[in-house]
Amino acid sequence: MFSHVIFGANDLEASRQFYDALLGTLGIGPGVLNNNGVCNRYFYRSPTGSFGITTPINGEPACHGNGSTVGFSMTSPEQVDAFHATGVANGGTTCEDPPGWRNGSVGRLYLAYLRDPSGNKICALYRPPKV
């Protein structure tokens, strides 16, 4: 459904260090610097899409979207836990409930939520196979 997601960052290098470590838990290599002549950006690529961080093109401070979340798909609860722990160890802050199972209208999910160094909310989500 999505080709890419990009977050604004106020401290691009702090955000790069955070996402290099965090996305490394998913086997994604370090961000690749891209300068479009207006701003610096880092892109992380996977076979299913791209994620980026950028200083805002308009020169204004980056801000997080209240009520916005970007979710990353995980292969196991252990990967969710590693993703979350790595994020906290690299400048992220935990938010909402601790990592764990949640039951809801879409079934049982294992989730963990973080805010990155610029305050953007991210989620690690494992959806077990239906039996």
Image (cartoon, rainbow, N blue to C red):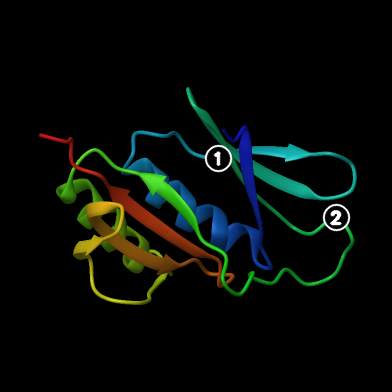
The image position of residue 3, as x and y in percent, is 62, 32
Q: Residue furthest top?
A: 47
The image position of residue 118, as x and y in percent, is 59, 70
User: Within 10 angstroms of label 2, few (less than 14), some, or many (20 or more) residues?
Assistant: some
User: Within 10 angstroms of label 1, few (less than 14), some, or many (20 or more) residues?
Assistant: many
Q: Residue at x 65, y 66 (%)?
A: 11
Q: Quadrant of the N terminus?
A: top right
Q: Quadrant of the C terminus?
A: top left
* Figure quadrant of residue 44: top right
Cα–Cα span, label 1 and label 2 = 19 Å
Q: Residue at x 15, y 49 (%)?
A: 78
Q: Residue at x 23, y 66 (%)?
A: 99
- The kind of residue tagged 1 is Gly
Residue pointed to by mark 2: 57
Q: Are marks 1 and 2 in contact (CB under 8 Å)?
A: no
Residue pointed to by mark 1: 31
Give the side of residue 131 with respect to residue 73, left or right: left
75 versus 88 height, above or below: above
The image position of residue 83, as x and y in percent, is 30, 53
Choose mark 1 or mark 2, whichever is in front: 2
- Marks 1 and 2, the one that precedes in the sequence: 1
Name the secondary structure under disc 2. loop
20 versus 30 height, above or below: below
Give the side of residue 55 with respect to residue 66, left or right: right
Give the side of residue 3 with respect to residue 131, left or right: right
- The kind of residue tagged 2 is Ile
Q: Residue at x 87, y 64 (%)?
A: 59
* Figure quadrant of residue 25: top left
Q: Residue furthest front?
A: 105
